[in-house]
Amino acid sequence: MSVVETIKEKAERVTRIGRPGDPGALVRPKAARLFWFEDDGFIPNHPRWPLILYRSVIRRPRWLDPAAIFEDLFAMNGWAASWRNGIFPYVHYHSRIHEVLGVARGVASVQFGGPHGRTVRIKAGDVAVLPAGTGHQCLEASEDFLVVGAYPPRGTYDVCTSVRVHARAVKTIAKVPRPATDPVYGKGDGLLSAWEQSRRRSKRP
């Protein structure tokens, strides 16, 4: 997180200026786009659950800080330990925890699923929910690109970048439990239904 964003976040939490009173009221009903990725021997991806992409899922009134909207929305739905930053420019994944990424500002081309995955253009207002093991890497981004990330309460943050940890990661990924809530819709829908599926399918982004 940049110094400016750090100061901004701390000031907002004290004053509540720029933060939403009810972040849930800013959520738009959107159908989830689902993407399955295969284990390529380097990036495991998830053996059962797809990446979930919500397009333009929140309204962003100009008097509110969009990063604060995502932080409060994710926290309200049980996804905490939030941060503000970009997405690493190298391919990586998390083997012990799921992750949500909310785009607060800008646009970026992100490759999901690893070197053999899919490149998706994400923009402000979009949310991606990555099951443990999902490879991701920022290929190109606007100068103002800003993401808010967060995690469910169960799991341990790690960053995997080497093929040497693949075999171990495959075992830990399968043990990460499904969260009790969706970071955007809470107990309403989203991953609660999408991740009930145990049979792998494929769909192009």
Image (spheres, rainbow, N blue to C red):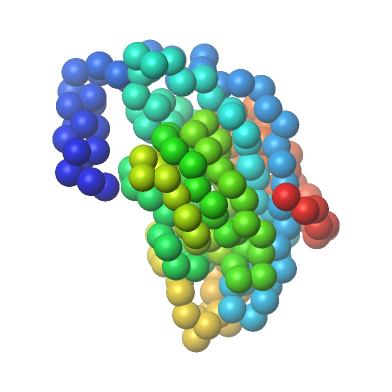
Q: Residue at x 21, y 31 (%)?
A: 8
Left or right: 198 in relation to 15: right
Q: Is residue 146 left or right of residue 127?
A: left
Query: For the point 43% across and 15% down, which residue is it?
Result: 61
Q: Residue at x 52, y 31 (%)?
A: 125
Residue 198 x, y percent position in the rendering: 78, 56
> Can residue 46 be seen?
no
> In terms of image quadrants, where is residue 110?
bottom right
Give percent across and percent down for residue 169.
54, 74
Residue at x 45% of width, y 50% of height: 141
Q: Nearer the viewer, residue 2 or 154?
A: 2
Report how many numbered discs are placed on residues in the image: 0
Given residues 144 and 174, the one toward you in this image is 144
Q: Determine whether 80 is above or below 99 in the image.
A: above
110 or 181, nearer to the observer: 110
Q: Would residue 59 be found to the left or right of residue 105 on screen?
A: right
Quadrant for residue 49, please give it.
bottom right
Vertical comparison of 54 with 11: above or below: below
